[in-house]
Amino acid sequence: MHEQSLEMIELELAILIRRTTSVSTNKKKWNLDRSAYLLLRRIATKGAVGVKVLAGEFQLDISTVSRQAAALEHKGYLYKIPDPLDGRAYSFQITELGTKELNDHKQARLERIAELINDWPEEERKVFGQLLKKFNQASL
């Protein structure tokens, strides 16, 4: 692989992350950091899940995901569902407040991204999305 291509990709990914997450750092009203947003989005789209599964999906330590989920539970964005077969285990489900916060934050992120690619032709937007998806799935 060509070193110059790798360096360009690495730099552009760093800038991409900064620009797409600037909505949460520039506006004090948003309560979700990147990890909270991803956890809530996953639970909202795929349903209740335990920390062990989340840790596997996000390639994080169970303790890290547990801490993040506990913080979201404390804010009222998630609640625990006890496992009927194992009294020690539980799953997390998103609350109405969590859904509202997620949707508000997601809308702000979509608006921010739309601003950045407003003058792109639709075909370029589609290709960009497909390439990002391909890149993100390559690490699974």
Image (cartoon, rainbow, N blue to C red):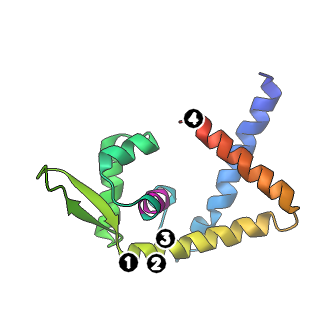
Q: What element carries label 3?
A: helix
Q: Which residue is drawn at 22% across and 55% down?
A: 90
Q: Which of marks 1 and 3 is nearer the N terminus?
A: 1
Residue 61 part of the magenta-drawn span: no
Quarter occupied by residue 10: top right
For this orientation, the residue located farthest to the left is: 87
Disc assigned to residue 56: none
Q: In this view, does 54 lie above or below 70?
A: above
Q: Main secondary structure of the magenta part?
A: helix
What's the CA distance linking mark 4 and mark 2? Answer: 30 Å
2 and 3 marks in contact (CB < 8 Å): yes
Q: Which residue shows up at 80% across the image and 31% down it?
A: 5
Residue at the farthest front position: 85
Res 96 label: 1
Callout 1 touching callout 2 (CB < 8 Å): yes
- For label 3, the residue is 102
Q: Is residue 26 visible to us here? A: no
Q: Mark 4 points at which residue?
A: 139
Give whichever of 2, 57 is nearer the camera: 57
Q: Mark 2 points at which residue?
A: 100
Q: What stretch is highlighted in magenta?
A: 37-43
- Dot 1 or dot 4: first in sequence order is 1
Instruction: Tell me how far mark 1 sits from mark 4, CA to CA.
Output: 32 Å
Q: What residue type is disc 1 on?
A: Glu
Label 2 neighbour load within 10 Å: few <14, some 14-19, many 20+: few
Residue at 47% x, 71% y is 31
